[in-house]
Image (cartoon, rainbow, N blue to C red):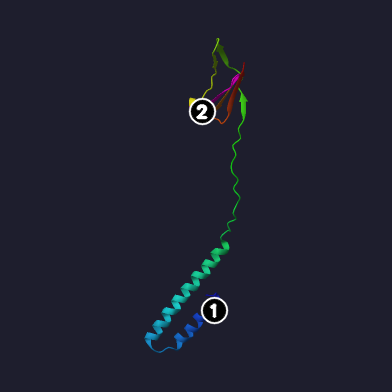
């Protein structure tokens, strides 16, 4: 209900209350005035709160793309015999689950996701 119309209704009910002579009619009018005043107050407070509440502006959320950097391992050693090549490396903080190895006919590509997010790559070609 619009604020001005509701205020007019309250004023008219107060006028009728002043002219009412029977206690039951006075009680009904008083009850209706109290109810309308409460509704008017609640709507007025809600409107004031709505004006003070900041509007929510939807933001575009972009998908996070992790930055992957490859670093060549500077030191490693190997041992080879006629049909085998063994590569020895030391990586602190790496576990077997975090190491990926790809073997090719004449090379091996070894990658390890380190705890700090850095990837160590070893490329050995015969």
Q: Which residues are magenta?
A: 97-107
Q: Which residue is mark 1?
A: 5
Q: Nearer the viewer, residue 67 or 40?
A: 67
Q: Is residue 99 magenta?
A: yes
Residue visible at 52% across and 67% down in the picture: 45
Q: Are marks 1 and 2 in contact (CB under 8 Å)?
A: no
In the image, taking residue 21 as reference, residue 50 lies left or right, namely right
Distance (Cα) linking label 1 and label 2: 72 Å
Q: Given this view, does label 1 or label 2 mark the residue nearer the observer?
A: 2
Q: Disc 1 on helix, strand or loop?
A: helix
Q: Residues within 10 Å of mark 2 (few under 14, many from 20)?
A: few
Residue 2 % position (x, y): 54, 75
Q: Answer above or below: position of 57 versus 102.
A: below
Image quarter (top left, top right, bottom left or bottom right) of the C terminus: top right
- Quarter of the image for residue 28 reads bottom left
Q: Disc 2 on helix, strand or loop?
A: helix
Q: Nearer the viewer, residue 99 or 75?
A: 99
The residue most toward the top is: 82
Residue visible at 44% across and 75% down in the picture: 35
Question: Which dot marks residue 116?
Answer: none
Q: Is residue 92 magenta?
A: no
Q: Which residue is mark 2?
A: 98
Residue visible at 51% across and 82% down in the picture: 11
Residue 49 % position (x, y): 54, 64
Label whose residue precedes the other's in the sequence (1 or 2): 1
- Quarter of the image for residue 87 reads top right
Q: Residues within 10 Å of mark 1 (few under 14, many from 20)?
A: few
């Amino acid at each position: 209900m619009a604020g001005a119309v509701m205020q007019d209704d309250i004023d008219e009910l107060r006028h009728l209350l002043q002219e009412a002579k029977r206690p039951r009619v006075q009680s009904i009018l008083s009850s209706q005035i109290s109810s309308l005043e409460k509704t008017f107050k609640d709507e007025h407070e809600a409107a004031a709160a709505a004006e003070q509440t900041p509007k929510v502006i939807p933001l575009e959320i972009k998908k996070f793309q992790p930055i992957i950097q490859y670093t060549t391992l500077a030191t490693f050693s190997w041992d080879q015999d006629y049909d085998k090549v063994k590569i020895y490396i030391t990586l602190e903080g790496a576990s077997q689950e975090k190491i990926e190895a790809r073997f090719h006919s004449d090379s091996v590509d070894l990658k390890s996701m380190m705890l700090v997010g850095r990837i160590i790559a070893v490329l050995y070609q015969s």
